Amino acid sequence: MPAILDPLSLPRVPPAAPATHPWRDRIVAALFALALGVPLVALTVTWSRTMTLFENRPMAPWPAPELARSFPPAFERAFGDRFGGRDLLIRLHHASLIRLFGVSGLASVLPGRDGWFYWLGEDTRSLDRYYRGVAPFSQREVDATVAELIRRRAWLAARGIAYVVTVAPEKFTIYPEYLPAWAAKSGQPSPYDRIAGALRADRRVAFIDLRPALLAAKARGQIYYRTDSHWNYDGAVVGYEAIMRAVERELPPGRLAAIAPPWRSPYVPGVDVFTGDLGILLGLKGWIREDGIPPPSQRAADLAGRCAKRGDDRKSPGFEVYACDRPGLPRALLYRDSMADALIPMLAENFSRLVVVAERRLDPALIEREHPDVLIEELVERMLNTPGAVPM
């Protein structure tokens, strides 16, 4: 039989705590105070920030002090974007999600297989819309884009300006094999297929479908970055050569004497490594890396011996001017997005004046003022509907 304890025989108070307990409690209290104080002190450094470090989005603004219900949530959003330690915590959170569960902390970045990452676009639906076919791309959008490109070509042709259009494919179009297993391609024609097919049937617009050339080049080596949303230098060379062949065809015979050959930047495997824009968005710069020539935004291009020099236009965001003094070269205007970053130095070697505009809407006044020999329009696949949505 187990012994029955008499509750009246127990001591009225518990025994005194060991002498080490007060020191433990002081240490815990000090660490708690430090955890509260450090973010507040660090706030003095981040107070004036306007852009987040990783997500590349505007921070919530500090609200004006007022006695209103809207003030507390607005202050909380602004404080949450700037509190000390946020950047480190984001890195740890995103790294743990990638390493432990293979998922992304951002809806716009999709981890694939074998260290590949995919950009899902500004609305996070580009894979669904242009590959899986589960997000709509209406026939009205196809018709509007085709009609606008034909209208642009006619407007330019009336002014004696050649017109060349190209679409840079998304990474998942060229490298679908590294997508997660659940990302199945639609059996229906993609928006790229539908627009390219309509333009080929019409035959008025010099439209360059880069997919066959890129898929052929892919067999010779990697042409898109694993950790970046863009093609790499080798992929850009494929695009450049196709664009310039089309420009040569569209200009009058002899107007372009020769196409400038692309040059190769020095590259040391295992030494030249970088983190692409998708790794940076996740806050994992240096944590996930790849070999290769970094994108133009992360390296100083070696322009020694190059003819084209950039003009004094750096105070105009999204507007660049390059000049090459070789006699007899034509003039060009390039409307582009970030996929053309690597194209610009190569293209500039072929023109006496190259004006580069990071806009989707063509500006008739600018075109009339510059009056180029050729207008080149480059857009990435996920922006295929923008010509119809923003007509000139």
Image (cartoon, helix red, strand yellow):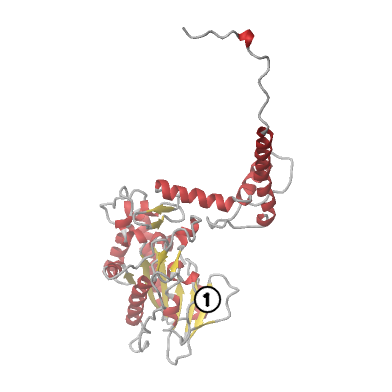
Residue drawn at x 61%, y 9% is: 7
Q: What percent of the width, then of the height, locates residue 279?
A: 46, 58
Q: Spot the residue most to the bottom.
A: 327
* Residue 220, placed above or below residue 83: below
Dot 1, crowdedness within 10 Å: few (<14), some or many (≥20)?
some
Residue 243 picture quarter = bottom left
* Residue 365, placed above or below residue 187: below
* Residue 128, placed above or below residue 14: below
* Residue 268, placed above or below residue 195: below
Residue drawn at x 46%, y 77% is: 333
Residue 58 picture quarter = bottom right
Please indicate whether residue 197 sits to the left or right of residue 69 in the image.
Answer: left
Q: What percent of the width, then of the height, locates residue 45?
A: 67, 57
The residue at which mark 1 appears reads as 320
Please indicate whether residue 374 sits to the left or right of residue 17 in the image.
Answer: left
Q: What percent of the width, then of the height, locates residue 129?
A: 36, 53
User: Which amino acid, by three-letter code, is at mark 1?
Assistant: Glu
Q: Is residue 129 visible?
A: yes
Residue drawn at x 35%, y 85% is: 252
